[in-house]
Amino acid sequence: MVQYIGSHDVAALLEKRGIGDFIRQLCDYLRADFRRWEDFEKSARLASHSAAGVIELMPTSDGTLYAFKYVNGHPVNTEAGKLTVTAFGVLADVATGYPLLISEMTILTALRTAATSAMAAKALARPESRRMALIGAGAQAEFQALAFEAELGITEISLHDPDPGAAGKVLRNLARVSALKVEVAPSVEAACTGADIITTATAAKRRQAVLSGGHIRPGMHINAIGGDCPGKTEIAADVLQAAKVFVEFPPQTRIEGDIQQMPADFPVTELWRVIAGKAPGRQTANDITLFDSVGFAIEDFSTLRLVRDLLGKDARELDLVPSLDNPKNLFGALMKEAAE
């Protein structure tokens, strides 16, 4: 039998532990795996693009466990009342090839994206950062706000979205679970004024410059998570040129991230090197740091490890792999089922 974790199981786990506590634990798991980054098999995700969106497979292995995630990104889905992103993940035993866990990852992807953002910001932003501009009030907004509150101690959010209904949704949701002071800003410029950190999380699948040089000032940290596929950007080139840029896996980020608009030799630093103490992050209070995040398979690996450890024997089981008296007699499993 294979362990199974559904969306209701994840919701129950979060209710029991608290979202902030879960995010802090996830940040710890992420840091642990980033520190051993070189132990993992790594490849850019396999993506199948269409006019409506993208479907991707994201695999990795540390030699003991193998994981992959199926995930889509379809901004047009909201017009039909569907989620932009859905996902599920698998954790397997390398020694036998047997799947150990199948899990929903629609909610977990939102949590791991937010936790990765917060982990990166803790390594790169000024320690005294307390105010964040949040550009985009879509599905990721609340998760980002709560992750930065839990991991960095952010107390104020200045939120901007051209859709007043989306902004209102974020205000209502955060008011139920957080002490964050959240204000709605009439423009990107207004949201960024006085911010220590800027998070851009827009959904439109096109090249755009949501954040430009006029919005930034020395000392800021920028968390750019919306540019995550070819042809989709949200950070102007002048911001990238002014910042020290950090990425997950360059072969993937140069195709999908905001740096896709830059020359092939545009300098970046892999985030794992900062986490592992092998490369500098922020070096002065006036540095502008930017995390160009597109999401990477090792982050899903860390998330699946955490939920498996937390649920343990409490996880439900799924009849996915036949249980045989004689492993050489697969056909006999059909006869057994028929007899029963």
Image (cartoon, helix red, strand yellow):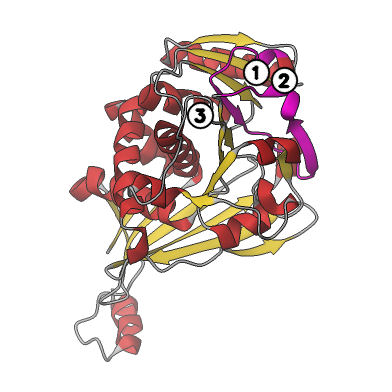
Residue 175 visible (yes or no): yes
| Amino acid tagged 1 | Cys
Q: Disc 3 on helix, strand or loop?
A: helix
Image quadrant assignment for residue 170: top right
Residue 112 in the image, given as x and y percentages of width and height: 44, 42
Q: Is residue 293 left or right of residue 255?
A: left
Q: Of callouts 3 and 1, which one flags the residue occurring earlier in the amino acid sequence?
A: 3
* Kind of element beneath mark 1: helix
Report the residue marked by disc 3: 144
Magenta-tinted stretch:
190-218
Quarter of the figure with residue 244: top right
Q: SS at mark 2?
A: helix
Position of residue 212 relative to residue 277, above or below, is above
Which residue is situated farthest in the bottom direction here?
328
> How much space separates mark 1 and mark 2, taking CA atoms?
6 Å
Q: Position of residue 256 (x, y in %)?
A: 66, 54
**Structural distance between the alpha carbons of marks 2 and 3:** 17 Å
Q: Is residue 82 above or below residue 323?
A: above
Q: Is residue 42 or residue 8 the one in the foreground?
A: 42
The spot of residue 18 in percent (x, y) is 32, 25
Residue at 28% x, 28% y is 16
Q: Which residue is mark 1?
A: 192
Image disc number at residue 131: none
Give the residue pinned by disc 2.
Answer: 188
Disc 3 to disc 1, how far (Cα)?
Answer: 16 Å
